[in-house]
């Protein structure tokens, strides 16, 4: 029997710092290892038939962390994009970014723009990297955009419904999440894709993100295949 593969999968990539601590290393070492694992996840997602992959890389709340850790994360993003974009393009991967760009370092923004431009015509796998992202901020910005349209007479407020809100999200064409994976033993959404995750199947694992390899990803897909998705109805 053919397996049911999620069209859109999201991953909360948690546990880099704890991975480093368990090895008596600084947190930046864990973030580097976690960044290296992103390439493995993208390759596996493409090979598995997933069409859209959203990765939670840095939240709007992560600015509360020590400055040196935040700086290391932003530099790792630049390094990853410079190194991986050509190969990702060659394998048909489109890279995009979701989140609030204001406040991000110029080097990071330039790398993001270059990767988006280089891969814009690829279609084998759509990868959305969520950087300076928060689900509540995304919804607030969507509401603000709709309110501005209504104030300018471009939109009848009575016409605003779920579809209108969905059209104003950061990447509306990605659609709802089918499967949401969270590594690192925590069991919460942490403000990630609150709208898109409304009916996602949620897979929690104790594995820390740097250890989440292909077998682990396959276990999450097997979990998804075992689920009956009823969306409030009956089987």
Image (tube, helix red, strand yellow):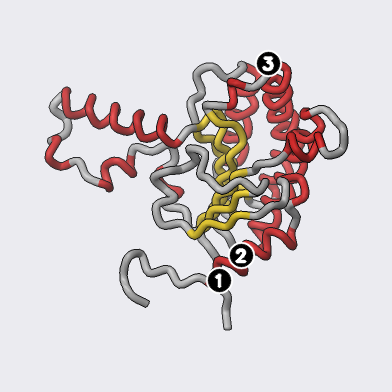
Residue under the point 29% across and 32% down: 143
Residue under the point 19% across and 41% down: 160
**Does residue 51 sit above or below 35 in this rendering?**
below
Q: Position of residue 22 (x, y in %)?
A: 83, 39
Q: Name the residue under label 1.
A: 225
Tell me which label, 1 or 3, sits earlier in the chain.
Answer: 3
Residue under the point 38% across and 69% down: 230
Relative to 128, is 200 on the left or the right? left
Residue 150, picture quadrant? top left
Relative to 82, is 60 on the left or the right? left
Tell me which label, 2 or 3, sits earlier in the chain.
Answer: 3
Q: What element carries label 1?
A: helix
Near mark 2 (Cα within 10 A), the count class, few <14, some 14-19 or many ≥20, is many
- Residue 94's disc is none
Q: Is mark 2 on a helix, strand or loop?
A: helix
Instruction: Work out how far the residue at label 1 is from the one at label 2, CA to CA, in angstroms.
Output: 6 Å
Q: Nearer the viewer, mark 2 or mark 3?
A: 3
Residue 87, picture quadrant? top right
Tell me whether the residue at label 1 lies in contact with that at label 2, contact meaning CB atoms closer than 8 angstroms: yes
Q: Where is residue 86 in the image (x, y as percent from the top left)?
A: 72, 40
Q: Mark 2 points at which residue?
A: 221
Q: Name the residue under label 3.
A: 67
Closer to the camera, 157 or 126? 157
Closer to the camera, 153 or 120? 153
Instruction: Work out how far the residue at label 1 is from the one at label 3, CA to CA, in angstroms.
Output: 41 Å
Instruction: Work out how far the residue at label 2 is from the one at label 3, CA to CA, in angstroms.
Output: 36 Å
């Amino acid at each position: 029997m053919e397996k049911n593969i999620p069209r859109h999968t999201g991953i909360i990539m948690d546990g880099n710092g704890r991975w480093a601590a368990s090895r008596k290393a600084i947190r930046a070492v864990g973030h580097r290892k976690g960044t290296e694992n992103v390439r493995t996840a993208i390759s596996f997602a493409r090979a598995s038939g997933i069409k859209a992959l959203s990765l939670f890389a840095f939240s709007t709340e992560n600015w509360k962390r020590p400055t040196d850790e935040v700086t290391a994360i932003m530099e790792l993003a630049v390094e990853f994009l410079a190194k991986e974009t050509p190969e990702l393009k060659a394998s048909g991967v489109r890279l995009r970014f979701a989140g609030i760009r204001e406040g991000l370092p110029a080097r990071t923004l330039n790398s993001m723009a270059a990767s988006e431009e280089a891969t814009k015509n690829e279609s084998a796998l759509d990868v959305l990297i969520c950087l300076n992202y928060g689900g509540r901020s995304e919804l607030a910005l969507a509401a603000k955009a709709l309110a501005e349209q209504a104030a300018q007479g471009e939109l009848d407020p009575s016409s605003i419904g779920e579809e209108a809100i969905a059209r104003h999200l950061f990447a509306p064409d990605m659609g709802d999440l089918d499967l949401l994976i969270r590594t690192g033993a925590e069991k919460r959404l942490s403000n990630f894709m609150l709208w898109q995750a409304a009916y996602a199947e949620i897979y929690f694992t104790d594995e820390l993100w740097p250890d989440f390899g292909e077998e682990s990803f396959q276990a999450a897909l097997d979990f998804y295949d075992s689920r009956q998705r009823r969306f409030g109805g009956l089987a």
